[in-house]
Amino acid sequence: MFIYLNDKVVPSSEAKVSVFDHGFLYGDGIYETLRVYDGVIFMADEHLRRLFRSAALIGLDMHRDISGVKLAVYETLQANSLINAYVRLTVSRGYGPIGLDPDLCKEPTFVVIANAFKDYPQAFYSEGIKLIIAATRRNLKEALNPQIKSLNFLNNILAKIEAKKADAHEAIMLNAAGHLAEGTISNIFFVSDGIVHTPSPECGILDGITRSLVIEDAVKSGMRVKEGEFTTAELYRATEVFITNTTMEVMPVSRVDTVKFKVGEASRALLKKYKQEVNGYVKEKKGEGPSLWE
Ligand code: PDD
């Protein structure tokens, strides 16, 4: 396996980062998750713009531009002979003496890890997955804005520990006001009275790229979509629940705590539509990237 580290591809055995890296010492850094279908990075510009937004929100100078990052991803894919992949981009503040001052670090540490994409079990899509509502609340957006895809992931990890204890796949966190926010790695949707509901960005969530596409698809399909503040009680009364992210796409939910749900028409239709979006995108962009496979 090969890793892109700073400015080149190296074997994973040589991909080492200092114990003085501020990503390790303080969680000072950002990341992004990409999915590659048939050699094409899906929604590449949207993901890379979000990476640069995260960087701007923490005052991190990436020392490279969007096209440089894209090229690094393609080089990593090529080195690993991958065309269907999961890609994790990590950028930390870099190496520097102990101390919180970001100026102690002169160069960010830049890492691209690419793995073959492993499909989720088909039963997750046909039967749905189990969620819990976590006791852990989502970080206050005024404290650590969830729009920063930060390396500081303990908030989400504490909720994930709760999910694991309950034998659930994902935990949904409420915000400080007690409204639904999001999952540890996903956005949540529910359908009631035929309307697709999802917490608005003001609830303190990451505005997922999959979430935006699913909202667009729902509107295009003639569904009504309501973004706003919702409670757990409203979620329990829903007729369908599903979650979204780059790797899961649209994943139906069979249970939230003790409340059961059926995989419904809207979830099925939106997953189908999402897959069509992916196919259309891949067809359109195929050959646009560097011709690394020729
Ligand atoms: N997670 N909310 C949180 C907290 C997330 O971490 C993610 C993504 C999402 C969905 O965003 P998108 O649709 O752009 O993937 C929402 C990625 C997959 C991860 O952590 O690896």
Image: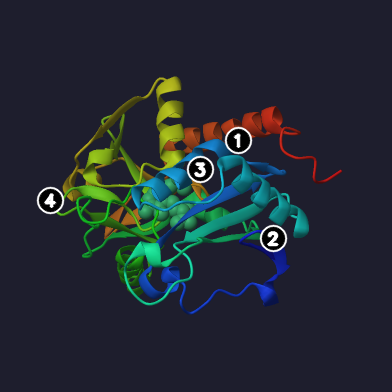
Disc 3: residue Cβ within 8 A of ligand 1's nearest atom: yes
Q: State how the image is colored.
A: rainbow
* Badge 4 amino acid: Ala
Please provide percent x and percent y for residue 291. 80, 40
* Image point (38%, 62%), residue name: 103
Give the number of the mark in front: 2 or 1.
2
Please provide percent x and percent y for residue 133. 26, 59
Closest to the observer: 131 or 52?
52
Report the disc number at residue 164. none
Mark 2 lies on residue: 8
Give the number of the mark in front: 4 or 3.
3
Please provide percent x and percent y for residue 175. 20, 52
Helix, strand or loop at disc 4? loop
Kindly tell me whether residue 290 is visible in this rendering: yes
Between the C-alphas of marks 2 and 3, the distance is 21 Å
Quarter residue 256 falls in: bottom left
Above or below, comparing residue 97 to residue 173 in the picture: below
* Badge 3 amino acid: His
Closest to the observer: 218 or 125?
218
Q: Is residue 103 left or right of residue 92?
A: left
Mark closest to the chain's N terminus, 2 or 1? 2
Kindly tell me whether residue 81 is visible in this rendering: no
Mark 3 lies on residue: 47
Mark 1 lies on residue: 278
